[in-house]
Image: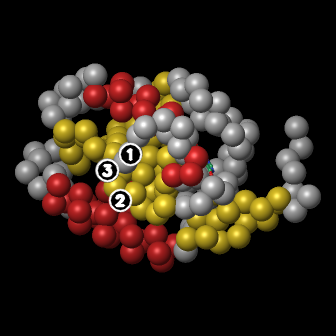
Amino acid sequence: MPQRPYVIDEMISAKQIAARIEELASEIRAEYSDTDKLVVVGLLRGSFVFIADLVRELDLPVEVDFLEASSYGNATESSREVRILKDLRGEIEGRDVLVVEDIVDTGYTLKHVRHLLSGRAPRKLKIIALLDKPARREVDIKADWIGFSIPDEFVVGYGIDFAQRNRNLPYIGKVRFTE
Ligand code: IMP
């Protein structure tokens, strides 16, 4: 299906993102200061840029693992059905775990992932999301840390895509259809 034409308006600059990550990292360092190893779980694919910047600010012993849950496909609306496409490589039982998500929208993805991972008995399970769209929430889930709370707009950049494009933008921008 041909894509409707759109432009991208900058919403959060690369500088603002970097400054916020520094703040979040210091809170996370404090929360996990007693850990022998933190397992940082990135939700693919949207969190790959965020996780890369975040772990480099953490200054803790970390292991990085990834989980892929089904996403929007080519649409801008959630399917509400969450499937695990790729599971973790490592065990998390008894471990300190930090789940890293790009955006909490309806909340279905995080709720499903939290349920799945907490069933594996980690010592501590916390969630960080770069962006939160509280107006869109349909299920009760809250991340422990949020980078930015944003209005109900479809956004791209900094790892986040629209139909697999625009992940490489260094900033977060909102999609504005021109037709
Ligand atoms: P949820 O299950 O509805 O909370 O959806 C979460 C997932 O939907 C995110 O991890 C993103 O992959 C995707 N998503 C939600 N909002 C946007 C957006 O504005 N742009 C791109 N992807 C989005």
Where residue 178 appears, x then y in whole percent?
87, 62
Q: The N terminus appears in which quarter of the rendering?
A: top right
Q: Residues within 10 Å of mark 3 (few under 14, many from 20)?
A: few
Mark before the other along the chain sequence, 2 or 1: 2
Q: Which residue sits at x=16%, y=44%?
A: 37
Mark 1 and mark 3 in contact? Answer it, CB < 8 Å.
Answer: yes
Q: State which tag comes first along the sequence, 3 or 2.
A: 2
Question: Which is more toward the observer, 114 or 171?
Answer: 114
Residue located beneath label 2 in the image? 54
Alpha carbon distance from label 2 to label 1: 19 Å
What is the secondary structure assignment of the residue under circle 1?
loop
Quadrant of the rendered structure where residue 111 is? top left
Quadrant holding the C terminus: bottom right
Please name the residue shown 32% across and 28% down the image.
Answer: 117
Q: Amino acid at mark 3?
A: Asp
- Please tell me whether mark 3 or mark 2 is closer to you in this view: 3
